[in-house]
Image (spheres, rainbow, N blue to C red):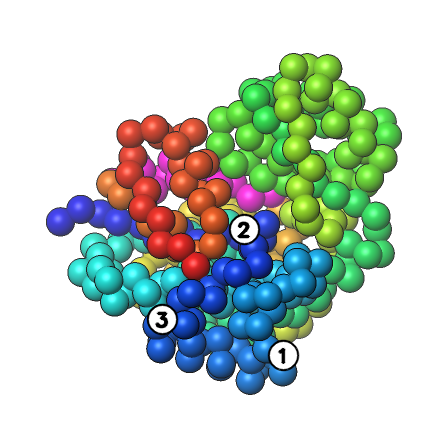
Amino acid sequence: MAKVAFLFPGQGAQFVGMGAALADSKPEAAALFRQAGDILGEDLLELCRNGPAERLNATDMSQPAIFVSSLAALESLRQSEPMVFDECVATAGLSLGEYTALVFAGAMSFEDGLKVVRERGRAMQAAAEATPSGMISALLLDLPVVEEVVREASVAGRIRIANYLCPGNTVLSGDMAAINAAERIIEEKSGKPIRLTVAGAFHTDLMKPADERLAAVLAGATISPPKIPVWSNVDARPHSDPVKIRDLLVRQVLSPVRWEETIRALLAEGVERFYEIGPGKVLAGLLKRINRKIECRNCAA
């Protein structure tokens, strides 16, 4: 039996129309969206189905929308390939996707996970509005060169590495002045800069005090030991202690995402096939840059 890992996407994977086909064809998916609407007091399915894109892309709504759409896609997979759940030995999610992974692994309930994700999105949106900032991908550059970009751009303002995604794709977060400088420097070093459509400098200390707000809401959520290992973005390791999991989720807001390290560790653990579960195919693309031979199946929202 092949060892399988489930991967869940993060913010940026959203698009108008996601989840609608699943809700129309799968009663279990429709039930998740109805439950989410009751919890949020807002018709999340209508927003996913018809937008507007500006509202769906806002951090406070995109995070719950991706979370629910990904879990709807998970229910679809449960019907189409039930045996793969017996083969799943680990799970991970990119940033926001870590919460989806925890719900899948039984560490959090759907209701608690959705409430925490909603407040996480609100806290991050507020922090972003307080400090004009952004994120930019540095493509086609090795990590030492990206570190040079950070050093040079820091003259203009605060800037940090936010995501270690895969070879040739590192994401920077910072003040807008520093991001503007980084864009120019990346080009000078023969890289390709791509601005990300996010509200602020996620996964850096510019997100304070979002971590404190998140800690407060997590304190009221029940977290149990996961039934299968859930790999943390902060240290690229799995954890079973609920206290440690809660602490790492708070730290994640200000800490860089170690995605490449996580994937390499899962491969070292013997994972032979991955499933990307949720909107988009970003994670499959990153996986191919890490190991072109490994299989990744997409279960789309």
Q: Give the main secondary structure, helix, strand or loop, of the magenta stretch.
A: helix
Q: Position of residue 16 (x, y in %)?
A: 57, 59
Residue for badge 1: 42
Q: Secondary structure at mark 2?
A: loop
Image quadrant where residue 61 sits: bottom right
- Looking at the rendered structure, the secondary structure element under dot 1 is loop
| Residue 59 counted in the magenta span | no
Q: In terms of sequence position, does the residue under pointer 3 or pointer 2 come before the other?
A: 2
Q: Which residue is drawn at the image coordinates 49% and 26% (left, top)? A: 167
Quadrant containing the C terminus in the rendered view? bottom left
> Is residue 60 placed above or below 87 in the rendered structure?
below
Disc 3 versus disc 1: distance between alpha carbons?
22 Å
Q: Is residue 99 found left or right of 141 in the rendered image?
A: left
Secondary structure under tag 3 reads: helix
Residue located at (34% from left, 28% from top): 292
Q: Earlier in the sequence, mark 1 or mark 2?
A: 2
Q: Which residues are magenta?
A: 256-270
- In the rendered structure, the answer to whether residue 134 lies left or right of residue 70 reads right
Residue under pointer 2: 13
Residue of label 3: 25
Q: Residue at x 50, y 60 (%)?
A: 18
Specify the quadrant of the image occupied by residue 294: top left
Tag 1 or tag 3, which sits nearer the N-term? Answer: 3
Q: Amino acid at mark 2?
A: Ala
